[in-house]
Amino acid sequence: GTTLIGDRVSGFKVNFTRNLFFAAKFSEDADPGRYTANVTLSLAATPRAVATGFNGIYDMQDMTGEICAKANIGDTGSLEDIRDGNVYTIAKLSDGNCWMTRNLLLTREGIEANGGTGTLTASDSNVVEDFEMPVSITKETIRSTDFPDSGRYEAQIYAAGAEDANWQPIYGAYYSFTAATAGAADTSSAELITDFGTSVCPRGWKLPTGQDFDALKSAGEIANNEEGLAKILGTPYSYVLAGLVRVGELSNVGHFTMYWSGTIRGYKGGAEALYLNHPHSSKINYVMVTNAGRDAGRSVRCVAEMPKYTVTFDGNSRGGTVANIPEEMSCALTSSGSCMVVLPDNVLEDSCAAVRFVGWSTEKLGTLPKAGTFPSTMLSPGGDLTVMGDTVLYAVWQETGASSTCSNSGDQQ
């Protein structure tokens, strides 16, 4: 009846040492002598998932951008989260990123059952400051005031179980946006925040951004229709319609779900999320990235953090105003040691109205004459640029022949 719990599994083996004591009772009139007895020892093992590894590692926390970059598209495996012992399937998908292909199931209770304290730290989690995991809400403890519209900035986690109709472990836990971002998103900010940089994901992983989800859909040619939904629910993506928790109830299991990103884009009280909707519904959208209210408990999938190169853009203005030039773009390093960005092509004419935008250059060029030829090093707007490191690009302008009201102080000789 005694349970023997071994040390942490390593290399598909578990070792433990325990002392066993035996005693025999004899009657007072037993003859002196040597006695022998047979003892039967039974060992029973409870099966549990064991990480098969991914590109030479076995723990989620050992993932690095370099390890992911060296993996091939289509590589799969599984890794253990050392915080609670859960094992997650992993795949390098067609967008070049390494993704969890199973929903996050991290709860305070799971961490404590694995010998932890329930506090996420930078040693094992994607956090900047320590985050105290909240006590999980369950079907027995949930109230109508949990996950309400008025409480959208509270860190709450719903831990579903066998008592929840249609729920399965692959659906994971349900996190408010504040919980998913490890307490960072506890305000009603509506400003653009591309990536909070902190989450309940393991160390080496992060919440995907809205752009990450868009890139995943684009690379996988996942359309906003029934075929696109079937594709993202299938191998190798394995997304699931886990439902959501809102106003004290888990609902829509098997029919609908939204996965948190780490992006806020101009919507007070909301954040971007990957939206998946079963075709039986009357709604017309199936797969898209859209805003989601922070009030609900939604699913989390983490993506490996990759080294990024930054491309910074300089308008190279002649003294007027230039529109539609982004401050910067970034791209994640791939196994080739480089990455690619699409150069902006919708740059408006300088307000001086005497020049037109014609392209980009790594050098700060002067204004090109109207009848001049373009330099061979000029990059075409809308074209692909292979980035080998952090890069600064300057807008290239050409005279139109019209009169200019601006000085030429911005020209470079």
Image (cartoon, helix red, strand yellow):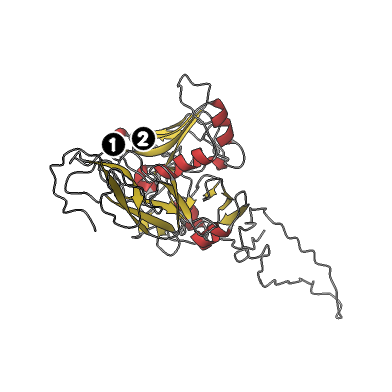
Query: Tags 2 and 1 in contact by the CB under 8 Å rule?
Result: yes
Look at the image and tell me in which quarter the C terminus lies: bottom left
Name the residue carrying label 1. Answer: 267
In this orientation, which residue lies closer to the viewer: 50 or 314?
314
CA distance for labels 2 and 1: 7 Å
Quarter of the rendering containing residue 121: bottom left
Q: Say which residue appears at 64% left-offset and 53% top-offset.
A: 48
Q: Residue furthest bottom?
A: 33
Measured from the top left, where is residue 78 in percent x and y?
A: 60, 53
Measured from the top left, where is residue 291 in percent x and y?
A: 36, 35
Residue 213: numbered disc: none
Question: Badge 2: few (under 14), some or many (20 or more) residues near its Cα, within 10 Å?
Answer: many
What type is the residue that disc 1 sits on? Tyr
Viewer can see residue 136: yes
Secondary structure at badge 2 equals strand
Look at the image and tell me in which quarter the N terminus lies: bottom right
Secondary structure at badge 1 equals loop
In this orientation, which residue lies closer to the viewer: 264 or 41?
264
